[in-house]
Image (tube, grey):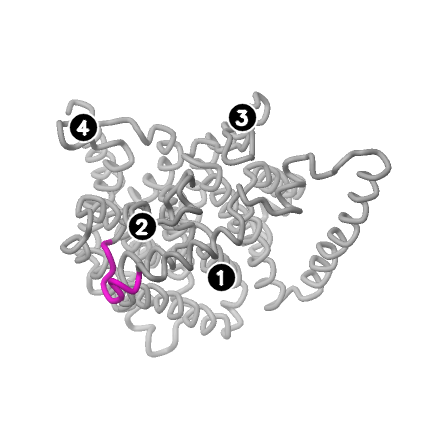
């Protein structure tokens, strides 16, 4: 109880001094605090409140207060109707959930993301925070996780999952979360070190290259294929829209690598009894393993989950209950899986929130995608929104193969930045009919 009281008092002091900028405090410290996620700050016989849960509740209360103060601007948020509908379904699912407490906890986490998206969108237009502020907070959030990742490489203290050993994880609960965090840093570096052509990066081009290599190298050593897929999707979007020559060259290099690799590997095996795939990183990129989240494993999971979804097709079993429902109904093939998670956000939403929640969530991304594309038709906004388009597309695709909404530490950063980017260019990209509202928003 003492720890919780101290945490609340400290937060109230920061919130009083920083006001709207408190939102940056959340994303600055959340990645580091993930390391102490199991630290119980309040416990009773029936309830154990860990540090991450306490942070989520503090964010909810703080963000709800500022959302109420800025409620008149909700209608200007891209996809607001679909986000509101999703939030309503997620929240109400507590009433019919197979595990109400679980659904309540997960609902808080999801609503936090929506509020971060909205407040980032509003605060940056009001001038309460700037892109520079957000970049400083993001850089601060990355220092300790990256140093921890480097330490894990040097000391060989990474974790083992399935048949993969030595996966670095920084300060996060799983290597996948660290990989998606690094992927987000690559996206932001692309925008603010390449597209924006800031003077700092023009003077320090070697540092820019070194950071890209560092982020990519660390991401590879998490052995997270979904992050690689996300980076490829990001590159394809940028290439199709603007950098077609670079896209063709990149795809040609990838194709050339795989065309050369397999014959070379077979040659080395037959002549020297040496497999290139004995290297775990090369193996991860060039072969499939039934023990390491293979495509066939995911397909069978979908096939076995479909009949369960049909029993509650409209409202689902309650948000966050996939592991509970799946463990009670899984087939013999999955009996010894080390995780009961869906590894697919869309599959879990179908089971947990039914068709209504699933469709509302998808429609939000359709609305967001449409808004971004409309903005990109304005010459002044094309490059500003190109990175965002690639980021959103990568997220949507990777969500097919990973539990992205569960990665709270990265999702706070992601959804806040989406709101910041859309809001930061609202005035220069707005239609004439929208400008009067923007002027009021800045007052």
Q: Is residue 321 visible?
A: yes
Residue visible at 16% across and 22% down in the picture = 2
Q: Secondary structure at mark 2?
A: helix
Residue 205 is situated, as x and y percent measured from the top left of the image, at 66, 44
Q: Secondary structure at mark 1?
A: helix
Quarter of image, res 195: bottom right
Cα–Cα gap, marks 2 and 1: 33 Å
Left or right: residue 315 versus residue 331 is left
Q: Nearer the viewer, residue 287 or 228?
A: 287
Of the image marks 2 and 1, the number of the one nearer the N terminus: 2
Cα–Cα gap, marks 3 and 1: 31 Å
Q: Which residue is mark 4?
A: 42
Cα–Cα gap, marks 3 and 4: 31 Å
Does residue 78 lie above or below 308 as drawn?
A: below
Quarter of the figure with the N terminus = top left
Residue 393 marker: 1
Q: Nearer the viewer, residue 286 or 303?
A: 303
Tally of numbered discs: 4
Q: Residue furthest right?
A: 271
Q: Which residue is mark 3?
A: 152
């Amino acid at each position: 109880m003492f720890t919780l009281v101290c945490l609340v008092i400290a937060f109230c002091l920061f919130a009083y001094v920083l006001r709207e900028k408190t939102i940056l405090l959340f994303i600055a410290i959340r990645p580091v605090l993930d390391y102490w996620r199991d630290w119980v700050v309040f416990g009773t016989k029936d309830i154990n409140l860990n540090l991450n849960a306490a942070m989520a509740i503090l964010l909810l209360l703080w963000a709800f207060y500022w959302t109420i103060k800025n409620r008149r601007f909700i209608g200007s948020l891209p996809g607001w109707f679909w986000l509101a509908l999703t939030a309503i379904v997620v929240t109400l699912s507590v009433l019919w959930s197979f595990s109400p407490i679980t659904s309540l906890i997960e609902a808080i986490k999801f609503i936090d993301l929506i509020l971060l998206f909205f407040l980032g969108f509003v605060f940056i237009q009001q001038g309460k925070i700037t892109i520079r502020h957000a970049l400083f907070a993001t850089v601060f959030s990355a220092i300790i996780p990256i140093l921890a990742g480097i330490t894990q490489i040097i000391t060989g203290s990474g974790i083992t999952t399935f048949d993969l050993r030595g996966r670095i994880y920084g300060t996060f609960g799983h290597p996948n979360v660290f990989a998606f965090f690094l992927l987000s840093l690559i996206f932001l570096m692309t925008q603010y070190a390449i597209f924006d052509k800031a003077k700092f990066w023009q003077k320090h081009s070697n540092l820019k290259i070194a950071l890209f290599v560092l982020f990519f190298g660390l991401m590879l050593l998490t052995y997270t294929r979904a992050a690689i897929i996300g980076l490829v999707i990001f590159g394809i979007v940028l290439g199709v829209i603007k950098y077609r020559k670079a896209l063709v060259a990149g795809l040609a290099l990838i194709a050339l690598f795989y065309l050369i690799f397999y014959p070379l590997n077979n040659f080395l095996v037959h002549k020297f009894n040496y497999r290139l795939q004995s290297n775990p990183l090369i193996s991860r990129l060039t072969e499939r393993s039934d023990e390491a989240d293979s495509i066939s494993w995911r397909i069978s999971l979908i096939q076995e989950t479909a009949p369960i979804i049909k029993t509650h097709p409209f409202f689902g079993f309650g948000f966050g209950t996939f592991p509970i429902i799946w463990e009670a109904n899984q087939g013999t093939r999955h009996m010894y899986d080390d995780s009961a998670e869906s590894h697919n956000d869309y599959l879990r939403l179908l089971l947990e929130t039914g068709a209504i929640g699933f469709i509302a969530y998808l429609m939000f991304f359709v609305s967001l995608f449409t808004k971004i594309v409309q903005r990109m038709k304005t010459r002044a906004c094309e490059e500003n929104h190109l990175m965002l388009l690639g980021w959103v597309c990568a997220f949507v695709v990777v969500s097919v193969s990973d539990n992205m909404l569960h990665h709270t530490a990265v999702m706070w950063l992601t959804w806040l930045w989406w709101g910041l980017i859309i809001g930061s260019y609202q005035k220069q990209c707005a239609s004439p009919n929208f400008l009067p509202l923007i002027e009021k928003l800045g007052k």
